[in-house]
Image (cartoon, coloured by chain):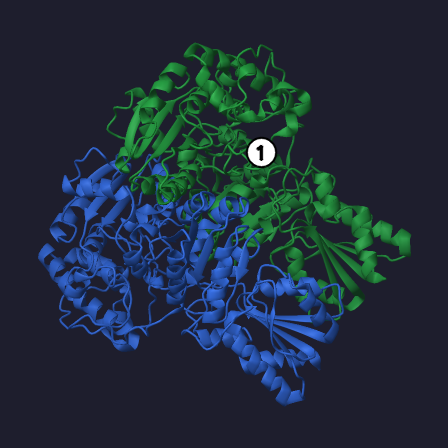
Chain colours: A green, B blue
Amino acid sequence: MNTKILDRVNGPADLNKLSADELTELANEIRPLLINKLSQTGGHVGPNLGVVELTIALHTVFNSPVDHIIWDVSHQAYTHKILTGRKAAWLSPDHFHDVGPYTDPQESPHDYFNIGHTSTSIGLADGMAVARDHRGDHENVIAVIGDGALSGGLAYEALSNAATLHSNLIIVVNDNEMSIAEDHGGLYKGLAQLRATNGKSPNNLFKSLGLDYMYVEGGNDIPTLLAAFTQVHDIDHPIVVHVHTIKGLGYAPALANEEAFHWHSPFDVQTGAALAPSAGRTYADVVLDELDAQIAAGVPIEAITAAIPGGFHLKKFAAKHPDRYHDVGIAEQQSITFAAGLAKAGARPVAFENTTFLQRAYDQLSHDLGVNKLPAVIVYSGGHVTGGDPTHQSTFDLAMLTNIPGFTVLVPANAAELTAALRWALAQNDWPVAIRLPRGGVDDSSEITDYDPNKMRELQAGHRVALLAIGSMLPLAQQVADKLQADSGITATVVDPRRVDALTDTKELHHLAANHELVVTLEENSLAGGFGEKVSAYFGPTNVRTLNLGAKRRFDHKQTRDELMNEYKLTVATATSAIEDILD
Amino acid sequence: MNTKILDRVNGPADLNKLSADELTELANEIRPLLINKLSQTGGHVGPNLGVVELTIALHTVFNSPVDHIIWDVSHQAYTHKILTGRKAAWLSPDHFHDVGPYTDPQESPHDYFNIGHTSTSIGLADGMAVARDHRGDHENVIAVIGDGALSGGLAYEALSNAATLHSNLIIVVNDNEMSIAEDHGGLYKGLAQLRATNGKSPNNLFKSLGLDYMYVEGGNDIPTLLAAFTQVHDIDHPIVVHVHTIKGLGYAPALANEEAFHWHSPFDVQTGAALAPSAGRTYADVVLDELDAQIAAGVPIEAITAAIPGGFHLKKFAAKHPDRYHDVGIAEQQSITFAAGLAKAGARPVAFENTTFLQRAYDQLSHDLGVNKLPAVIVYSGGHVTGGDPTHQSTFDLAMLTNIPGFTVLVPANAAELTAALRWALAQNDWPVAIRLPRGGVDDSSEITDYDPNKMRELQAGHRVALLAIGSMLPLAQQVADKLQADSGITATVVDPRRVDALTDTKELHHLAANHELVVTLEENSLAGGFGEKVSAYFGPTNVRTLNLGAKRRFDHKQTRDELMNEYKLTVATATSAIEDILD
């Protein structure tokens, strides 16, 4: 690859030595590097290709890290990383994994926050600007936020607050006309009108919130961007710079299919085809099949997503049932409050959520659904140890969901149990129900005829030791039982509790207490606020001892799943050993 | 009181039989009833006085409960209750407590939701409208939301979604120019311009979000309102009806002091003076005194509130340190993300929150503060059994806060411990810290010289039984210990754990394990996800038994604190008996 200009850029200060033509050439050098690495590692394709020029222009005009540039979601910060001393991670496959996918203060003084959720940048910038003012300093504070992220209510709260500041704050709206999928909401009518009128439309969200405003049509043209940013450099009040960019620019497959290339697994550069096509049927498909059946049977299902249809194959659902499909934008709060309204009026809403993003709707889960006992169904991904970035860690699902009164939380272990759980949830009218999707490929091997979430399922009858394992931990529990048998002749009881928010199967609980000296729980979510603690509290007053195995209350950073599972004693050897230590 | 017209109104249908003049007279009859009851029971004065005419007009034009009127926050629904069959609760002191302060489906088919948090009405209405469309029905769906509640991001998410609907949805913006306190944010510049221009200002938030819009200046004039609502009745698309009302209208003291009369304790009707003036120094004052001292010592404190300065006496702080006081509006998410930006840039933010509203910021506490390990301090009220409305229940504080990695959560028991906890939190740079304000009047009797949150405080040395009691439960624990001594000669150990998110005092924990057969925890927050479960999990593998006493995982409804504390075994008799049952 040609890196003639990039070879001279070891930090943002080097950009000032380059002409506008050389900066444009630099963009042309960076884009193939991005595509090359992304095709091998996977990652956010479209967002990064769209902001190459924007990033170069920002780092040319502003003086990072004295001036502060805060990247919303920060999944578009690859060029920022390349320009701030981390280009090696794009030049050689040996270094591809030296940097993470999001901004990270541990990587560079040019990164201020670990960010992976949307819509935070303006509020963070607002805080940094106020602290700067009280320090008596005058650096520029710049938030870069996409049009998709503007649909999150936090961005709006922060815009309204930013308008009250009497000092420098530059909000760059990177408008590529797309969220993860297409944009949804009336907000986007207004933005489209602004783009169509070169910023002149009277329907201007930013002005209506009291903010100064500038429109920049050429968001992928370096001279245009340099002029715009030079104009607002050191500005003495908050301003929105609305920049029109092209998501996926410079890579035809990404332009042709913006949603698929928002984030893409490794792909063939020539064709854009995925190198390892996805394996077909997933647990989301199991859910969608059941929803099809329910709709056919006349159940008034309404499917809801907060801008992440891809993870659940919801576009398939939308094609079949267009008026029953609702993408509310990156607006998890609204996804749940909307569901509450639907449920109250007799519809059967099913919200598809990712647990780390669903955190945004904690109050809506509690106040709108829980207090009101509305029978919405939440189908969610997460609840598993994955390693990777702490901003997307999904091990806090049970801490969030199982302590809200009224929520029934089900952790099915296979396809049959998932379908049964969903059917049960849709057949009752008393409570909201959350269902965690099982981990991994679809296990279609089981059949279930007697599903009742208030009845635990005993997989193996035993004595002395009982293993209560939820969802993905059931196969491990069976292996641990085998090893206990082999090691010490103990036949352990193995139980799938099915429901994890409360211990309702008193018959099985009495049986466990009567015939066991140790009850072990296995869960791969965080132990704090999780299932095991509830089991320990239940048996606390008795002579039964308990041991909770699960993830730590900790944000993990760049460890692998294998490393973490070993540390958490969620392998056959470590779990068995922990149990045997107590029995000795 | 004159109730000549009201005597003829037993439901909304009766309003149609009245002339506009009679409806105006009805408003004049209702207002003294509101003031009379409010002066005796306390409650939301200004919000209810402002919407008397608006409510009469809505119930005259629309056909509730076939048409659905959803009241945001629902603290302004008294006239709605009077008109929908519940007027007895305003006519006779014997019935004053027959109805609750918020809408409640258990009270009336005219109420759809238990609502007590702001900004939910538009999203709920959006869901009801979509369900209606799929049913093939055509009733009107109306959300009534105040200008204050518009500062919450959920309202914005819902406005943007509402704009995509192709059917009836009427959003009445009740603009009384006030939040709980004064409005904060650029949003309010735009609303003021709309009021000043009779709705003609180009800076129109609602139009910028793609919504149709109508302005109504005379929000307390029945004929004007009837005309406006008749115009939008059965409208075939979403519209915002922006109505200018006067908060506190008809009661001079409420007009003169809108913030104090947003919610007011019982007062003298003639003067507006509180019947039981507040008792002086509170735990919030203890915090503010320490912040004054820290600021004097050069610590860059920034105080933040999400529109509830009154509960913490923050106006006193604002008067002394105007540029260090930040009311972000009813925008809890922003209150925390803003704090994260401040902390990152070297300031020391202290956010004052109420735990039930802080739920809105769960993701910001986790992702913005927790992942980033930013040393913001959260001082919060709640965490106590209060009885009252489930929408404001405050027993979920530890379930929310203590399971987020990195948060240190402190539960001081008195003024000295509160000051020490705050000092400790502000002196460290490693983590966010949440501090629960103690319950009740200020206990200034203790002194603390050796505060360390990682060292438990042993109040009484004993054996066999240890009582770990947090905050307000310490006096109870000491009484229980006395009763155990008297009943059975057991000298119990009594411990204040101080820190409740993690068990870090290994020396004390070893001591407890070595010398006790039963460890009892006492907390008046919800047990699920709380402190006791962590203690039970810790001792699970040992021979020490545990008993967790605390509030149930349940939304309580209209019970008193005394009833609940008895049920939760948090009285001397019930707690001692529960302990003795295990020891027998």
A229 or B278, which is in the foreground?
A229
Q: Secondary structure at mark 1?
A: loop
Q: Residue furthest left?
A: B21
Query: What chain letter is assigned to the residue under label 1?
Result: A
Q: Quadrant of the N terminus of chain B?
A: bottom left
| Amino acid identity at mark 1 | Glu
Which residue is depicted at the point 80% across and 56% down? Answer: A579
Q: Quadrant of the C terminus of chain B?
A: bottom right
A328 horizontally vs B227: left or right = right
Q: Residues within 10 Å of mark 1 (few under 14, many from 20)?
A: some
Q: Which quadrant of the structure image shows residue B542? A: bottom right
Please say if A389 is above or below B440: above
A100 or B517, which is in the foreground?
A100
x, y percentage for residue B56? 20, 56
Residue A504 visible, this angle:
no
Which residue is depicted at the point 39% across and 39% down? Answer: A155
Residue A30 visible, this angle:
yes
Q: Which quadrant of the structure image shows residue B289? A: bottom left
Mark 1 highlights which residue?
Answer: A107
Q: Which quadrant of the structure image shows residue B539? A: bottom right
Please say if A237 is above or below A90: below
x, y percentage for residue A41? 64, 24
B95 horizontally vs B295: left or right = left
B19 horizontally vs A392: left or right = left
B25 or B571, which is in the foreground?
B571
